[in-house]
Image: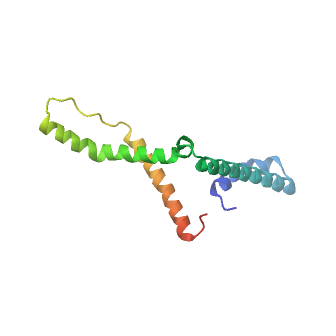
């Protein structure tokens, strides 16, 4: 099977199955049923994702782009905007209150790396010609 997560989960299940079901044929039949159920769940999720992406409403189809834009804007503020605007504030308005800073940059970086990793995988699929 070509799906690593399913293989990992199946390996976790195989240990107890070997002890609980000594009959090799029954055990292989049960393993096949588990694999089939896992694949059917994945196919059902893919169908849901397709319907969400095809929806006309921005609130349904646009949540993934929204997360990307929020992450990009937050990083732009944290790494460029905050320092630049803080410097300008200190030069022209030294008595004004400080600008708001972002907390949780570690979480933001983790999210960004996850999004970029998924984008990279999609690019590799396109380059190999396996995307649809």
Q: Is residue 107 left or right of residue 77?
A: right
Q: How is the image coloured?
A: rainbow
Q: Residue furthest front?
A: 56
Q: Is residue 82 left or right of residue 88?
A: right
From this view, report whether residue 130 is shown above or below residue 108: below
Q: Is residue 87 visible?
A: yes
- Which residue appears at 67% of the width and 56% of the height? 7
Tell me where residue 23 appears, x and y as whole percent: 87, 54
Q: Residue furthest bottom?
A: 128
From this view, report whether residue 21 is shown above or below residue 95: below
Q: Is residue 12 visible?
A: no
In the rendered image, the quadrant that contains the N terminus is bottom right
In the rendered image, the quadrant that contains the C terminus is bottom right
Number of numbered callouts drawn: 0
Name the residue nearer the viewer: 108 or 23: 108
- Which residue appears at 17% of the width and 41% of the height? 88
Q: Is residue 78 left or right of residue 25?
A: left
Tell me where residue 15 appears, x and y as whole percent: 73, 50
Tell me where residue 56 appears, x and y as whole percent: 58, 46
- Which residue appears at 42% of the width and 43% of the height? 70
Name the residue nearer the viewer: 80 or 56: 56
Q: Quadrant of residue 28?
A: bottom right
- Which residue appears at 65% of the width and 47% of the height? 48
């Amino acid at each position: 099977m070509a799906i690593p997560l399913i293989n990992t989960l199946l390996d976790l299940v195989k240990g107890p199955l070997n002890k609980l079901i000594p009959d090799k044929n029954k055990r292989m039949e049960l393993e096949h049923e588990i694999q089939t159920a896992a694949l059917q769940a994945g196919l059902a999720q893919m169908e849901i994702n397709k319907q969400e992406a095809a929806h006309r409403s921005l609130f349904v189809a646009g949540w993934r782009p929204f997360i990307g834009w929020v992450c990009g804007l937050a990083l732009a503020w944290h790494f460029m905007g905050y320092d630049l605007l803080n410097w300008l504030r200190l030069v022209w308005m030294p008595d004004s209150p400080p600008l708001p800073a972002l907390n949780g940059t570690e979480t933001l970086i983790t999210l960004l790396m996850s999004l970029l990793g998924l984008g990279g995988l999609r690019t590799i699929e396109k380059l190999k010609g396996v995307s649809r």
